[in-house]
Image (spheres, rainbow, N blue to C red):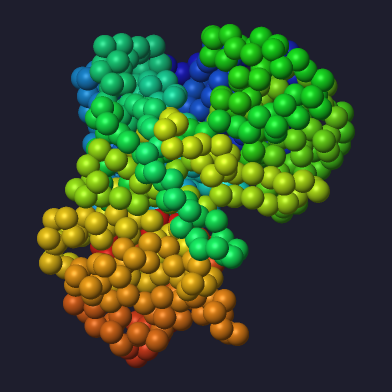
Amino acid sequence: MSTKNTFDILPGEVLGKANQIIQGLSKEQILWLGGYLSGVGFAGGQNNIEHNSVGDSINTTVKASDKVKLKILVGSHSGNSKKVADVIARLISDNKDEAEIVNMTDYNPRNLSKEENILIIVSTHGEGEPPVAAEDLHKFLDSKRAGDLSKVNFAVVALGDSSYKYFCKTGIDFHERLIKHGANALAEPVLLDTNFSDNLITVAKATYKLFKNSETNATELAVEEVKTTTSENGIYKAEIIEKIQLNGKGSNKETYHIELSLNDSGFTYKPGDALDVYPVNESKLVQSVIKKLGFNINKIININGENTSLLQALSHQREVTVITAQVLKNLAAYTDETGINELLDNHDKLAEFLEGTDLLDLVNKFNFKLSAQQLVDALRPLPPRAYSISSSQSEVGNEVHITVAPVRYNKNDRTHLGAASVYFADRLSVGEKIAVRIKQNEGFRLPNENTPVIMIGPGTGVAPFRAFVQERAANNHKGKNWLFFGDQHFATDFLYQAEWLKYRDKGIINKLDVAFSRDQDEKIYVQHRLKENADEVYKWLDEGACIYVCGDRKHMAADVKNTFVEIIQNKENISKEQATEKLNILRKQNRYQEDVY
């Protein structure tokens, strides 16, 4: 890559204005601005990549090799980071350069200083946490042991969901920690949202360009070939063939069992996978937003080169039930009110404000002066909602089942509804169709057929374990199965009760422990049942059992994890720190897997 003087790129007067703009900006704001500008460069002036993108914001003092030899370090949970890595590596290989993909779990961090070019591709989970595979490298770079990395060129591709508070935090951590140890950043980190597949080819080409001579054009044929391998089976309009409310009369809960036909879709899936569902936004909400802003529902706007009405765009193509920090930043340009910027400058207040806020809340609170086109451009593309698949294809064939709990809550004196969950509950009937896609989850897989499994899934968290048990029953697996289930009341909320009892009677479920929190004065949850069975739980672990946890991340998953630490600590008479490390080893061995949200 040839170096250029800064003034060859920007005239002095333009550079002066740029310096004026960035004076006083925080590190996070400068990071976002760099990505925004590179995104504009990517799109030829159209900001159609919502977050930071690898582009022309390259550290031009770094000279990349003429012959690319790239080490791609992947930290993934569900497998999305690996998919991105595969596309980039294939593109590099097809253009006669070299790329080696290495799972961070298998990488010795002490080799970092010996690398010339590394690409970090990593996802973020929960409260900004790295996936299990990335934990050791993430921790290593936060210590003095990493040493001097000044001979290393690097870039970061971070995956996340912008509806979460700590969007792509792990990738940003890697970027900042590598710089701290002297590594040479070739660009600001690219932050990929849930719709990353839409921009994957662009990202792959630009990432390759970072490590190659800047004049290089990747082979177009190779790009197109790669593109066909990343379609994730496409999108299919699946017909609803069964819809059953699982809760009994008088329950405080509302849960639906949904069965969909996959007929001629060609879809295949494994236990542990999810079903991406593409909802249609509620008409009342969409029209209320349009009315509040004074727009005509038939106003023609343009999305990705295609004309459509404003009503259709907000119903089918733009997110209106969830507001992210990025969307708030985008819309801040269209109001003179200082309240938005005050929110954006306060991380905690911003998170509190965004919790449960939809677009109607936002336009009711702030006075925006913008066109219909500007509104649509500022909003996030409508992402699919992922539901754990609650069936095994070995059992149900060309069907897929999911378990759906409608989201309904009150805020700002009105009822808010979940985009997909209430779409299923209130607006879709048997015989109607909905767009779906299989979402693979390589981080939540059954072990070999002889390995015992312990499954912990309260509420709708039990969904994937219905798939697990069906799979093991249909294929005559010999491994023992222990299910922990919890909900509010035995009489009304024992989801799939008849099926669990049938499998227990047949000896497929060897142990079944339930916790119904509201059936007695003292609330009892699944972690309490684990403690009560500590001796046998530890015995199963000693026999090589794999543990699976699905459901609420903030409370249930944390409590269950702490319970396992306590069980190990007590049974082995070791410290809490030692027990925690032993559980971490189980996680790295894929013997403790979570699918939590």
Q: Residue at x 66, y 25 (%)?
A: 378
Would you say residue 125 is visible in this rendering? no
Instruction: Establish if 420 lies above or below 435.
Output: below
Q: Residue at x 28, y 84 (%)?
A: 536
Please name whichever residue, 38 or 115, is drawn nearer the observer in this view of the structure.
Answer: 38
Q: Split into 4 quadrants, where in the image is the N terminus?
A: top left
Instruction: Establish if 63 lies above or below 576.
Output: above
Would you say residue 449 is visible in this rendering? yes
Percent position (x, y) of residue 404?
Answer: 48, 50
In the picture, measured across the screen, residue 22 lies left or right of residue 259, that is right
Instruction: Establish if 10 lies above or below 587.
Output: above
Percent position (x, y) of residue 527?
Answer: 45, 77
In the picture, measured across the screen, residue 285 lies left or right of residue 500, that is right
Please name whichever residue, 53 or 264, is drawn nearer the observer in this view of the structure.
Answer: 264
In the picture, measured across the screen, residue 95 lies left or right of residue 561, that is left
**Numbered disc total:** 0
